Image (cartoon, rainbow, N blue to C red):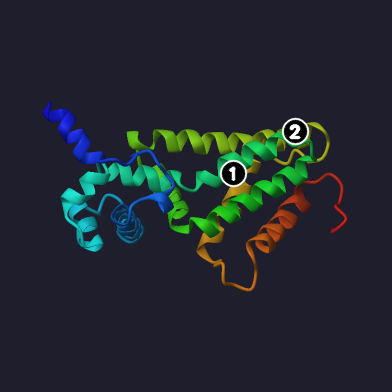
Amino acid sequence: MAANTAAKRSYGANDPTSLRVEEWPEAKLAIYEAALDLFSSRGFAETSVLDIAHKANLTKGAIYHYFGSKNDLLRISTQRGFITLIPAAREIAARDIPAADALAAIVYEVVRAIELYRREVTLFLEELPRGENPELEVTHRLRDEYEQIAVDIIERGIENGEFRPLAPPRVIAFAMFGMTTNTRLWWRPNSPMTAGEVSAFFSEVFLSGLRTTPSHND
């Protein structure tokens, strides 16, 4: 009975798996924002639940009312960017379009995710390689699915003669993601270039070396 009461107190009436923070109560959103700021500036391991409570101007009890643990906040933070990435990638992969166009669309979605979820994407890239945190198992699966979609597109492009086999498809995908994810370090939505312009530039630079024949822009 005590365990059931604790569970209800920890999660309240809120779904702890929900990633749509815009639908959360104000206090829950304040906790998330405080945690995200601290994780970004100090690192996850160096941030305590008490630190989060102080920054959010709430009690530790308020945090445990909405989240089961600090790991819940990390899990939600690292998964949030995939809200747009995974559905978009699945839809892109299902289109009957040239591999180059599909890859350009993937690049755009990565830049768009950075525009919408810069802190979350940064946290994901920094925290995911640091250890086997069981809370990040779903995040690992989402990342693997997204990477595989890109690899499959590249493999298709090589098989149908669109792309040169410059390296194994997975290496090519990692090179593409390395270029696009670093956008978070220098680009801001209020810069002279829009997300669409940044992604179009990246796509043209990347694909110009990958295509077997020049595009109309080359």
Look at the numbered disc 2 and give the secondary structure of its residue: helix
Task: Give the image quarter of residue 4.
Answer: top left
- Give the residue type that dot 2 points to: Arg
Check the picture and name the quadrant holding the N terminus: top left
Task: Give the image quarter of residue 197.
Answer: bottom right
- Give the residue type that dot 1 points to: Phe
Q: Is any atom of residue 66 visible in this view?
A: yes
Q: Residue furthest left?
A: 2
Considering only vertical position in the picture, is 132 above or below 49? above
Q: Residue at x 20, y 51 (%)?
A: 62
Residue density around tag 2, few if under 14, some if 14–19, many if 20 or more, within 10 Å: some
Q: Nearer the viewer, mark 1 or mark 2?
A: 2
Q: Residue at x 51, y 44 (%)?
A: 82
In the picture of the structure, the residue carrying the numbered disc 2 is: 156
Q: In terms of depth relative to the viewer, which is nearer, 25 or 109?
A: 25
Look at the numbered disc 1 and give the secondary structure of its residue: helix
Q: Provide residue 41's location: percent of width, then percent of height.
A: 33, 61
Q: Is any atom of residue 168 visible in this view?
A: no
Q: Is residue 208 left or right of residue 26?
A: right
Q: Residue at x 54, y 59 (%)?
A: 115
Q: Provide residue 151's location: percent of width, then percent of height.
A: 65, 36
How many numbered marks are there?
2
Q: In terms of depth relative to the viewer, which is nearer, 72 or 48?
A: 72
Q: Residue at x 75, y 38 (%)?
A: 165
Distance from disc 1 to disc 2, alpha carbons, whole Å, reads 16 Å
Q: Is residue 210 left or right of residue 26?
A: right
In the picture of the structure, the residue carrying the numbered disc 1 is: 174
Q: Is residue 56 left or right of residue 169?
A: left
Q: Provide residue 39's location: percent of width, then percent of height.
A: 33, 55
First in sequence: mark 1 or mark 2? Answer: 2
Residue density around tag 1, few if under 14, some if 14–19, many if 20 or more, within 10 Å: some
Whether tag 1 and tag 2 are in contact, CB under 8 A, the answer is: no
